[in-house]
Each structure stands twice: as structure tokens, then as C-alpha cells.
Image: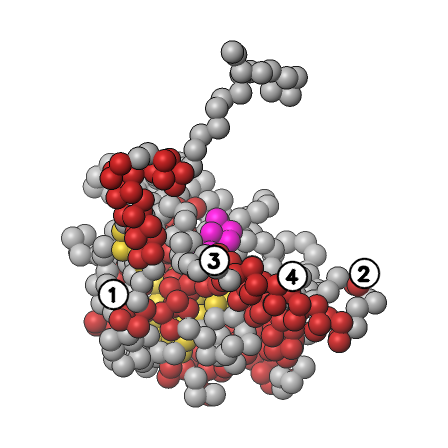
Amino acid sequence: MPAPRDSAFPHPRPAARPSRRAWLETAGGGLGSLALTAMMAEESRAGGDPAGALQYPPRAKRVVQLFMAGAASHIDLFDFKPELVKRHGQESDFGEPVEAFQNGLGPWLKPVWDFAPHGGCGKLLGAPVAALGRVVDRMAFIHDMVSTSGVHSAATLLQTTGFVLPGFPGAGCWAGYALGSLNDNLPTYVVLPDHRGYGSNGVKNWDAGFLPAQHSGTVVQPGAAEPIVDLRPHPSAAWLSAAGDAATRDSIHRLNRLHQAGRDGDGRLEARIRTYELAARMQLAAPEALSLADEPEHVLRMYGVQPGRGDWPGEINAEEEIHHFGLKCLTARRLLERGVRFVQVWSGNDNGFPRRNWDSHEDVERDHGPLATGMAHGAAALIQDLDQRGLLDDTLVLWTTEFGRMPSSQGGRGRDHNPFVFTNWLCGAGIRGGVTHGPSDEWGYKPLDRGNPTTVHDVHATVLRLLGIEHTKLTWRHNGVDRRLTDVHGRIIAPIIA
């Protein structure tokens, strides 16, 4: 007899497909039983042993990552190239075919700003990042970073998760999984996005992927009316008393645990319960951590924060960037000193035009000028503040972006994507200050030593080592593979370690 039809489903209904488990249970004979047993054993082995990865005395207890979304130009900020000054305006010649992301192979373009030496190490810095000169002797620059992608989304994921595809845990998730929390009343991993919106990939950059969900980053919006969304009851629930709220949480907790009984191994359920419990504790801890009421005036000035100042109308400007990035950096310091393990601070978003990020195809001076000024002011203040509080010795600061920009011009004033070389810098716990590692070539086009560049896996391996973790041992078994942050790569960058 043909399958029935109806108006909502005009085609014959397919027979319901049995689940894999049900099919194996009814397959009969030894094959089905063996397959089911093997499948269940594989599921029970999912996970890893983070304690087995803790093999070194930790130099760092916590990490703050500063991420410039859109691709900051190394040759205009950190990696001075006299040859570009000499050849400015001449037809670019890379000595090999170049596949540009857009039409960015115009004449050579000299650095948009003048460079000057800073600190005892004499590091040359572009004018917009001159504020970093106050702390440059504590910083280690890596100028031969390379990416495997020139596409923002893929390259951003590579820097945040170690992979160009979504679905893998962020570096902060791995740190939380391995080391746990320093404060049970605050998240282990906090993300402070750009005040205008998320960068490429959004939450995929800090999602826990296949790790237990409680290791995902918690988004906090400093300066917003509601910095942590849905942490408190909605205003329409004004009738709810504190006692009633506590009783409700207690009832939900007991119901969750009853539901969990008999469901061993359901990591999603356990993560959801832990998240609810953390949210309840955060109702007391988070407001204090995020409030600036107890910050003295001189600290606010140091960060460039103007309390009560709203968004600036009109075009992007340096004063606005100093305030907003400084606010995120000050918030990061408050979270770090209260036990948050990993804080990620973002500059630049993925929405709108004219651009409000570092993707300066049209005009490097227009875009990078205010963004770099704000970043340098806030980052320098953060490093100085951590240092004066005795926290820099065990806090690692990592600055990164998804790739660099080309030494040739695009449209006269802009620069195209350059995944072939770019800059990172690190500061703080265990880092040898005032050094430069891995030079780029005379143009800032590729590493000088093309056969031995520095990769994000090397940076991640080094960060984990400073946290006391052997990166090859920090794994989670997923789909039959022992996954790790560094994939199958990663070398410790020994020259930058003190």
C-alpha cells in the first residue's frame, strides 16, 4: 500500500529511520553487540586528562589577549622598513607572482607615520603607538608571524582556536579546562568585545566547541547599561523579592540535579547546571568587579576613561578609541586581579561602513590612526597598572591580529591583506623584554627566513608552556582524535622566554 499523503506533506512520507544505537541493538548476532559495545566504549573515553598536561612550574597564572580585528598593519606600527621609504611610489616588484586578496598590488607605500626609537632597547615604533614606548622594554616582538589564510573569518579562527574551521575551542577555553578557576564566583574566561559589535565569526572565537560548555567565554560589555546580558531579572519582574529569587534558584538547582540523576556522562547537562549556578553567584560578584566607583581619579586618567561619557557622534576619532579601549583594559585588570584566568579584549568589529575596524583597504591613516592610538594608550596603561600592582610578573599579555597588510598600496592610501607575514608581541610573565624575534624581509612582505617562520601554533605552545602546560599533552578525544589547541604543530619560542 502506498504511503499516505496530506496537504502539508504532498510527497510520500519516508519510513522513519532508526537511530544508529537502535539499529545496532536490533541488528542481531555478534556484530551488532560488538559494534554497540565499541561505540559506547568510545563515548566513555571522550575527554582527556588535563592534570597530565601540567608538567612545568608555571610562570603565568593568567592571560590577557588583545585582538585587533580586521588585520593591523605591521609595517605602519611596529616593523619599520627603510626600503619602503626609499622606494615609495615606485612600481612594486615582489620578485614572484603574488595572489592579492583584492587589487592591492599598486606602487610601494612607505609607512604612513614616522617611526622613532623608544625605551632602552631603542625599539622603533610608529607615531600612533608611541604610548607603548613607556613599556616597550618589557615587550618581545615577533615579526615573522605567518597565517595559512588571507580570509578574515578563517584567519581569525586560526589565531583564536588554532584552526581555520569553526567548531574548535578557543585558547581561553583550553586554559580553563586545564587549570580551572581562581575565583568560583566569576567566569574563568571573559570576553570584552568591541563596543560596536563582534569581529569576524562572533562567538565562534570563544566557544568551547567539543570541550564541556562551561569552558566557553562569557561576554561582558563594559560601560553598557547591562554589561552581562540576562544576569538579573527583567524589570517587568519587579514583584520578585530577594527571598523569592533565592528560593526559585534553589528549586531549579534541585530539579536539575534530579533530572541529572541517571544521566551520567551528559556533559551538556552538567555544563548547563554549572552555568546556572555560576550566574547566581555572579549576581553578587560581577557588579563589584565591573564597577569603577572605587577607582581613583589618577587611574582613570591613566587609562583615558571618562566615566559617564556615551558614544561619540560622527566619525571615529582617537579620543573615543582611547576611552573605549581603555575602559576594556581597566575592566580586564579588575577581572584579572579578582581571579579571572583568561581575558580577551577586542578592538574593531565586523559591521558597518565606513570601516570601524583594522581592515584598511581604503585609507590606513583614517582607520589605523584612531584605533592604534586608543589601543596603545590602553595597552600601555594596562601593562603599567599590572606592574605597579605586582601582577605583571605572573600575567601574560598577548597582542595579535589575524594577518598583516601589504607593503604595496591599494587605491593610493590603503593596503591589501598580507597573510604572508605580520607581527605579534608579548609582555609580562616569563617574557624576555626589549627583544625582537624573527625579522621580516626588506619589504615586510614575507619572513626573512621563509623556511622557518613563526606560526600561531608556536605562540599557543609558548603561552601554554608559560602557564605550566605541555601543549602536546593537553588533549580532548573527539571523534576518535586526540585534539589539542596546537593541532599537530607548535614549537616553544625559546628566544623570547626569560
Circle number at residue 267: none
Q: Residue at x 51, y 53 (%)?
A: 203
Q: Which residue is mark 1?
A: 473
- Secondary element under disc 1, as helix, strand or loop, is loop
Q: Is residue 320 visible?
A: no
Inter-mark Cα distance, 1 to 2: 49 Å
In this picture, is 320 found above or below 297?
A: above
Residue with the mark numbered 3? 263
Q: Amino acid at mark 4?
A: Val
Marks 1 and 3: in contact by CB < 8 Å?
no
The picture places residue 7, in percent across and down from the top left corner, at: 66, 17
Q: Which mark's residue is nearer the viewer, 4 or 1? A: 1
Front disc: 3 or 4: 3
Q: Which quarter shows the C terminus?
A: bottom left
The answer to which of marks 2 and 3 sits earlier in the sequence is: 2
Q: Secondary structure at mark 2?
A: helix
Give 314 or 108, whichever is nearer the viewer: 314
Residue 347, percent across and down? 51, 60
**Dot label at residue 236:** 2
**Within 10 angstroms of label 2, few (less than 14), some, or many (20 or more) residues?**
few
Answer whether residue 449 is magenta in the image: no
Q: Is residue 295 visible?
A: yes
Q: Earlier in the sequence, mark 4 or mark 2?
A: 4
Which one is closest to the eye, mark 4 or mark 2?
2
